[in-house]
Image (cartoon, helix red, strand yellow):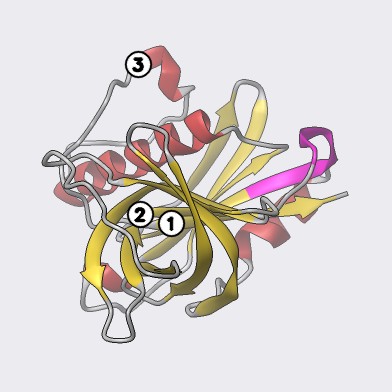
Amino acid sequence: MSENMLEIIARRAPRESLTIESGPAFFASRDGKRTLGDAEVTISRAAIAIRFAVGGGFAVEKAPYGEASGSIAAQDESWAARAVNDAGVASSGERLFSTMALAVGKAKGSDVAATRLVFAGAAWQGGGAIDGRRVIVHRLSCDTVSHHDHRITVTVEGNLDESAIETIGRATSFVARAIKGGQLVVRFRSPREFGLGKHRSVDDTFGYRLVAFH
């Protein structure tokens, strides 16, 4: 992919609201048990919400503090939320879930030209490489009065697996706070070189992924 094309993808304005219409999906509990139903996804400036409907309803086991209740994914694999938290029952009867990250798109890894992650709650930019692939971090927001309105994109050549996406999500959260406080000057290397482990603190960032195809 040309450098200009990667820049164009990185700088595209994100959709601030998005609804994925209700369709067949499944909820996977912490122990791996699957419950079939229909799910609708709504992305707003403040949250990613999932309405999950099952005939007769179903119970969700309370998760330990800082842990996810399970995962939800479309049966056709068009989208997936690998970690969701139970938010109770909606007035219309569906089960409500929140998630910090939603992966949208289905393709073979070899068909993906670039992956763009959109994060809220961060406002910085830069460039570099991860495992030899070009990375562009572009600040989308300006003149904001609240960090909740901050937006950045992290655009990487090729496909990213879920582990890499999760690691980048943690890294952007830490970097945003450190840069804002003046404790950090950005220099890019693979996050795995730093041995990033599990981080379960509550965070106010969320993101979703879009993929660009050849």
Q: CA distance from mark 3 to mark 1?
A: 22 Å
Could you tell whether 53 is left or right of 171 in the image?
Answer: right
Q: Which residue is mark 1?
A: 207
Query: In x, y percent, where is residue 56?
Result: 38, 69
User: What residue sits 66% from the left and 22% below the top?
Assistant: 132
Relative to 85, residue 91 above or below: below
Q: Position of residue 25 (x, y in %)?
A: 56, 58
Left of 209 or right of it: where is 150? left
Q: Which residue is mark 2?
A: 100
Q: Which residues are magenta?
A: 108-115
Q: Which is nearer the N-term, disc 3 or disc 2? A: 2
The tag on residue 75 is: none
Who is closer to the viewer here, 175 or 187?
175
Q: Which residue is mark 3?
A: 194
Residue 109 inside the magenta-drawn segment: yes
Crowding near the residue tagged with mark 2, few <14, some 14–19, many ≥20 C-alpha atoms within 10 Å: many
Residue 11 left/right relative to 152: right
